[in-house]
């Protein structure tokens, strides 16, 4: 994941989107890029794991079946606690988002791979999907009553306009915070891994004294990689949890 130009370290180079199979139709670029390839791989892995897990028999479950059941129960419990039974119809959406983000985070961790969620356009697209779903579902089920979401109960009338303005601004900035949280965490972690890895290589290529010192960034890199494994899961969890909370606003607009 490290990029060098001479002795300079370029940790941003790993995030460059490059075409793998150039495709142009009617003057428009539909090329298969490294980003789209990793998304296809992530979808394939999720489908294979869930399909294999669903084929388990009534006996002792295998590893894949146990993993599939654990993921199912984890997301079902999270969605049910956030939205109630009425929110379970959104389980396929929340489960798909969680598994996609988790797998795409994990397969982008090893060196010389590509981290899709370090691209703001990808996380913004997922956040906008959730944002627009909340608006459409809320208006479809509650009509104009859905706008009660922006009018908290029990607020004194003299500060109500200010509170409503704050609620509207907070709602409109949800896609920004929802997407940037995932993007920034994955971007920062990979930059740190790249810098430490490149620094280790530079020290190993220097004199004998510097080779001994190279142990320090190598150990730090191992620690950061372990931390990134945790962050990969936590960010998928946070993204899915926020999705559940936002969907609750569409189902129960006056619930908060």
Image (cartoon, rainbow, N blue to C red):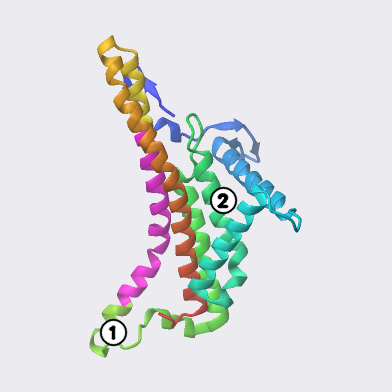
User: What secondary structure predominates along the stretch shown in magenta?
Assistant: helix
Name the quarter where the C terminus is drawn: bottom left
Residue 168, located in which quarter of the rendered image?
bottom left
State left or right for residue 131 relative to residue 67. left
> Which residue is pictured at 70% across the width and 54% down the height?
60
The residue range painted magenta reads 165-193
Distance CA(mark 1)–CA(mark 2): 40 Å
> Which residue is denoted by mark 2 in the rendering?
100
State left or right for residue 219 relative to residue 66. left
Mark 1 or 2, nearer chain start = 2
Q: Can residue 38 be seen in this view?
A: yes
> Which residue is denoted by mark 1 in the rendering?
160
* 220 vs 175: above or below: above
The spot of residue 158 in percent (x, y) is 23, 88
The spot of residue 128 in percent (x, y) is 49, 60
The spot of residue 10 in percent (x, y) is 36, 28
């Amino acid at each position: 994941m490290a990029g060098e130009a001479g002795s300079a370290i370029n940790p941003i180079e790993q995030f460059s989107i490059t075409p793998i199979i150039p495709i142009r139709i009617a003057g428009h670029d539909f090329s298969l890029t490294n980003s789209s390839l990793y998304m296809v791989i992530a979808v394939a892995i999720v489908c294979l794991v869930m399909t294999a897990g669903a084929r388990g028999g009534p006996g002792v479950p295998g590893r894949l079946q146990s993993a599939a059941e654990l993921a199912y129960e984890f997301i079902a419990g999270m969605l049910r606690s956030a939205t109630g039974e009425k929110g379970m119809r959104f389980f396929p959406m929340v489960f798909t988002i969680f598994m996609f983000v988790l797998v795409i985070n994990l397969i982008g961790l090893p060196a010389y791979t590509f981290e899709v969620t370090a691209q703001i356009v990808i996380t913004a697209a997922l956040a906008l999907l959730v944002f627009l779903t909340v608006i459409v579902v809320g208006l479809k089920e509650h009509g104009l009553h859905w706008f009660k979401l922006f009018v908290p109960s029990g607020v004194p009338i003299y500060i109500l306009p200010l509170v409503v303005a704050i609620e509207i601004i907070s709602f409109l900035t949800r896609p920004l915070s929802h997407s940037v949280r995932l993007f920034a965490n994955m971007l920062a972690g990979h930059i740190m891994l790249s810098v430490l890895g490149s620094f280790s290589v530079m020290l190993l290529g220097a004199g004998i004294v510097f080779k001994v010192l190279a142990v320090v960034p190598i150990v730090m890199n191992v620690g950061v990689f372990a931390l990134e494994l945790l962050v990969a899961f936590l960010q998928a969890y946070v993204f899915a949890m926020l999705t559940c909370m936002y969907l609750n606003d569409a189902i129960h607009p006056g619930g908060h």
